[in-house]
Image: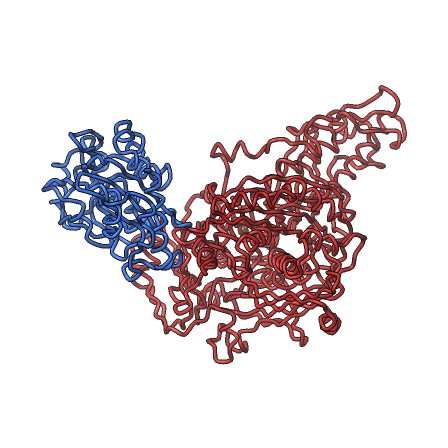
Chain colours: A red, B blue
Amino acid sequence: MSGTGIGARIERTEDKRFITGNGRYTDDINLPGQVYACFVRSPHAHAKITDIDVKEALALEGVVKIFTGKDMEADGLGGLICGWMVTSKDGEPMKAGEHPPLASECVRYVGDCVAVVIGESREVARLGAEAVSVSYEELDAVVEPAQAQNQNAPKVHDGIDKNLCFHWQLGDKDATDAAFDKAAHVTRLDIVNNRLIPNAIEPRAALGDYNPGSGDYTLYTTSQNPHVERLVLSAFVGIAPEHKLRVVSPDVGGGFGSKIFVYAEETACLWAAGKIRRPVKWTAERSESFLADAHGRDHVTHAELALDSDGRFLALRAHTVANLGAYLSTFSSSVPTYLYGTLLSGQYDIGAIHVEVEGVYTHTAPVDAYRGAGRPEATFVVERLVECAARETNKDPVELRKKNFITKFPHQTPVILNYDIGDYNACINRAVEMIDYKGFDERRKGSQTKGKLRGIGFSTYIEACGLAPSSAAGSLGAGVGLWESAEVRVNPTGNVEVLTGAHSHGQGHETSFAQLVSERLTIPIEDITIVHGDTASVQFGMGTYGSRSAAVGMSAIDGALDKVIAKAKRIAAHILEVQPDDIELADAAFRIKGTNKFIPWGELALNAYTAHKFSTDEIEPGLKETTFYDPTNFTFPAGCHICELEVDTQTGCVEIVDYVAVDDFGTIINPMIVEGQVHGGILQGIGQALLENGIYDVESGQLVTGSYMDYTMPRAHDAPPLRLDFTKTPAPSNPLGIKGCGEAGAIAAPAAVLNALTSAIGHEGISMPATPAKVWRSIQT
Amino acid sequence: MYPFTYHKASSIEQAQALLDVSNDSKLLAGGQTLIPTLKQHLASPGTLVDIGKIESLRFIRVEKANVVIGAATPHAQVANDKNLVQKIPALASLVGKIGDPHVRNVGTIGGSVANNDPAADYPAACLALGATIRTDKRSISADDFFTGLFETALVEQEIIVEVAFPVPALAAYEKFPNPASRYALVGVFVAQVEAGVRVAVTGAGANGVFRMTEMESALVNDWSADALEGILPSVDSLLSDLHGAADYRAHLINVMAKRAIAQTC
């Protein structure tokens, strides 16, 4: 096989158009007669809307139309939904507050949409939005979940006591308590998992279009899952029936989870396009992205780990308060529950686990999945506990981990998941060797002579990816199946189009998916096109998140390739007058095994369509196959990340001087792309650990970190040298053995960095982000 | 942006005339503060008079014991100027660390000094070196020029023409950047000039850039980092925000001052 198949480190074919400015993003698309939307947003965290006066705005030249929530209600539109049902421990379903795309009675966070002004230009729309006069009756707001749980706290939604959406639990409480009772040592930690603001480089955008002739709607938007977007907008919001709505998600500049969700803005643009019969475009300004993209994380947790006298983990328990923000976003309820609690066994054989999670509404932007989604929060709890337990019991953190690692598979954890394969010792052994753990004490002394504190920290993480076996997801409350579809179209001239329901927004699918096809069909990668992101082309798909696209999406392609190859062999057998079993596909030709008789790939493709040389009674013409693939289990990528850092005691600055990551992603298609995914993930993890923090003012409910002046995005300057390696235990739950790699870095890194930092400063009393000011204060005596 | 009329001036005289035409006009130099402000609808001048393109204001020349920089000279040109690098390397280095390459290619010394952002770098250099800000009307010493947060001694329609920096015997600048914005959370410029030892602090003062006279006195007798041990400004005079409380900034002023001195030793 040429060097473009599975395992080949080839450059990304899509990069040429991106780096030459030829990407085609939503905002690049312009339609005749297009107008622009600007949203009137709430300046208050909590207020009653008493009046909306649009007269002055409507009088402005170029303002086309203004819609409010009342207009949408009058048109019978439904609210935005949360697609994952979580049940509280008392058996009650979660309490989902209403979520109208445009608020008409009450605003619930700063940035909540109140009206949409449509103008002939962006500037006119914006001037119009400023001219809309909204009268508010300001109400007290609450942004901290702990305060929101007070009986007399301001209520985000009427009728929801203590702002509690759900009080969920997982695991065996009695068994866990019993194990704690006989523990020789208990490690206790209070943990804050800081709120993050996603900051994809391309802001969210939407262009709604309506064809009055056919009654068809088209929505161009920045979505990680266009089919789910269409399903929600048709079945729940009710803008148009599914067959009359096309959603196109063209090139998308990063998502990190924030573009999974169905938001108010694209809903309003699409609906308004139908009302005024002109295309309506909106592109977020960066300040809107800060205010109104779904945020990530924001947990407060108390966690405990019970050990016996030998250092074996007996049990783990955690109580987490998760800030959900003002509304339930599309998948927000699943993140602090099933994507979090199920991972609390980490890589360890822990006899009993019990976790309780209170999901609480506050007057802040909705919180939903952000790179890792629940799994970084779980890893941070487990790995901080383990590191602290090692320190408290004077055990080596590596040895304590190894003593408790799961080594026999399959392994049923006490929190639903059944780990199918892994080799955790292989990862940690390699990582420890790479970082020269033995030499750490010497390096620490060297740092001391420079007046610096040096620390080393470990993070042996696990994640559940390849989301997900549909029946399992359904039993946990998912409102959708989590399979993936693929269609392989071989054209008469022999080149191939592959339609996938996965969506690439930076992951490089157009390259890595084509590598699989090149490998299987033995044809050049130049002859393969990956088609995604358009509901009019791709029959259905569940989109890209949860590190699922390779494990699930490529498995679907693999299944379709099986069918294509089988059919092509039948055709070849007819033409060559042998049995299909006698045919092999190699070097772009169908050959009778053991002979030099063959049909070239292109000739076979043409024959499939001319249908002259086989009986169409026996074989249908054409060469196109579809597969819907549902995985049999989650996949379980795992690895060991080790961070070594120095602290400048005079300033509190932290410098990561070495970072080693050894990951087991099963089969790797393109090592360069996978390394890039790990690099990016680690940088986001370092961002969470040291830099990023979404802060709301406790009194006013204003977003304090609403721009790059105050929200610290990681920069090139913050990127340490990263040294990567991989181990491999192929996933048994999919035909390719792929586990997924997109989130690993963001999951592993925060714990590795904080474990290193606390190792350096000699105490555990510091929270993320460990800014220089915070570190400096924590080391003052 | 709100609509406005844009005029590109080709000389100071033309700029003055254009300013006279309208009473809600504003000067535009590199625009690195003003343009984002306009984009956010936080300002709505009716007229912008662009003096950033006036060729005669783009220069760096040595004038006796001074290096004089034209008001419209972009940071990148200043940072890389051979004469400046030789005469006042601390200033060239400071300018080379303003913002990012984009900002340095567009932002100008005149704009920075006139804006007097409390976290900007240039004001520290002006104050510590005892620079003179020369306008179309007069010359103003740095000590008199910077009067408060975003406040200067400039009067309506007064245009900065150039800034003259005395060449110091020794000078150094140490900046502790705000982790988010990369502006100075604390920046300390130390200098030995003919007028004596001068220490200026940016990023931290509740009233903008200020001199640390206590440090200056200590350094007159003993130009060493040790001489600064324990010399901290009062926290009452310092900014406090989510990136650094006043006591942290006070501490950093001491650390940065010592590091600046250490650079020169």
Q: Which residue is drawn at 54% across and 57% down?
A: A296
Q: Which residue is drawn at 42% across and 57% down?
A: A705
Seen from this angle, which residue lies furthest front? Answer: B221
Q: Where is residue A66 in the image (x, y as percent from the top left)?
A: 38, 60
A348 or A496, which lies in front? A348
Q: In which quarter of the image is the C terminus of chain B?
A: top left
B224 or A707, which lies in front? B224
Seen from this angle, which residue lies furthest left? Answer: B137
Q: In this view, does B251 lie to the left or right of A777?
A: left
Q: Residue at x 63, y 47 (%)?
A: A641
Seen from this angle, which residue lies furthest top? Answer: A596
Q: In which quarter of the image is residue A464?
A: bottom right
Q: Where is residue A553 in the image (x, y as percent from the top left)?
A: 68, 45
Q: Where is residue B133 in the image (x, y as percent from the top left)?
A: 17, 41
Q: Where is residue A738 in the image (x, y as percent from the top left)?
A: 72, 44
Question: Can residue B17 be seen from the camera position used here?
Answer: no
Q: How many labels does the image show?
A: 0
Q: Is residue B199 left or right of residue A147?
A: left
Q: Which residue is drawn at 31% across and 43% down?
A: B224
Q: Is residue A558 left or right of residue A457?
A: right
Question: Can residue B91 be seen from the camera position used here?
Answer: yes
Q: In which quarter of the image is residue A724?
A: top right
Q: In which quarter of the image is residue A677?
A: top right
Location of residue B104 with respect to A182 vertically, above or below: above
